[in-house]
Amino acid sequence: MPGPHVQRTSKSQLTYDWIRERILKREFNPGYRLVLSSIAAELSVSVVPVREAVRRLEAEGLVEFERNVGARVAMVDEPEYVETMQSLGVLEGAATALALPHITAEDIARAQSINDQMRAMLADFDPAVFTTMNEKFHRAICHRCPNSHISMLVDRGWERMAGLRSSTFSFVPNRAPHSVEEHDHILRLIREDADPTKIEMTVRRHKWRTVEAFSHHTH
């Protein structure tokens, strides 16, 4: 028979999953106040596992604490998000174009496999996992960029995005299917040895479309 600590940990995990799912599905929007006692009552648990779950979500950047308000769903720093995505579009486009002479058939096959996995995820969508796979896709097509400085800037861009929110796709609903289609188009251009400038601009435009979807959704 499990001890009380194991039972509490289980309740904490269930509570964490319940809150996190609602944040990622935008049932709890940025700024939504998380009243611990109300959540505890909703889930028929004590406040203790709710507090533990909220602390975990705070560590992930999904929840923040505000004085005199308490826990709430983390706000998105819109200007920083837009600037980071715009910069990443330029940098990833350049990195991909420079990587073209060095991309192997195995690289393309790996990128295609990642995108196929992303497509399969659309039916049972998890924004956080999808965002992680999206990063893997783009790294697969630009990791052979011979310019170390540009590669370093791409890495910094992704790190900055991770600090803004664990999931880009949690606040750009309906963008995911279009993203998968655009990935296929990018890979098709690479396989056809299209003009490097065309590929660079296609990658840039792909990233900027996410910015446009975000701006449309938040205004």
Image (tube, grey):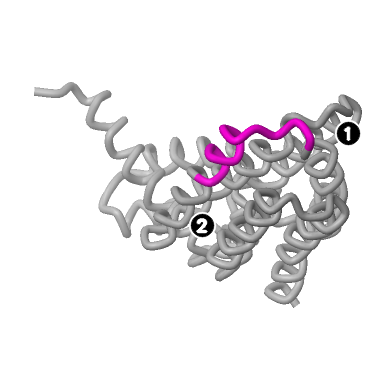
Crowd band around label 1 with a 10 angstrom C-alpha radius: few (<14), some (14–19), many (20+): some
Q: Which of marks 2 and 1 is in front?
A: 1
The residue labelled by disc 1 is: 150
Secondary structure character of the magenta stretch overall:
helix
Magenta stretch: includes residue 58? no
**Residue segment shown in magenta:** 101-112
Residue at 48% from the left image edge and 43% from the top image edge: 113
Relative horizontal placement of residue 123, taking residue 75 as reference (left or right): left
Residue at 58% from the left image edge and 64% from the top image edge: 181
Residue type at mark 2 is: Ile
Quadrant location of the N terminus in the rendered image: top left
Crowd band around label 2 with a 10 angstrom C-alpha radius: few (<14), some (14–19), many (20+): many
**Which circle's residue, 2 or 1, is located before the other in the chain?**
2
Quadrant location of the C terminus in the rendered image: bottom right
In the rendered image of this protein, does residue 149 appear above or below residue 119?
A: above
Residue at 88% from the left image edge and 33% from the top image edge: 150
Mark 2 lies on a secondary structure that is helix
- Res 150 visible: yes
The residue labelled by disc 2 is: 23
Mark 1 lies on a secondary structure that is helix
Relative horizontal placement of residue 40, taking residue 62 as reference (left or right): left
Residue type at mark 1 is: Ile
Q: x, y (%) of residue 109?
A: 53, 40
Residue at 54% from the left image edge and 43% from the top image edge: 133
Q: Which of 168 and 20 is in front in this view?
A: 168
Q: Nearer the viewer, residue 44 or 117?
A: 117
Magenta stretch: includes residue 106? yes
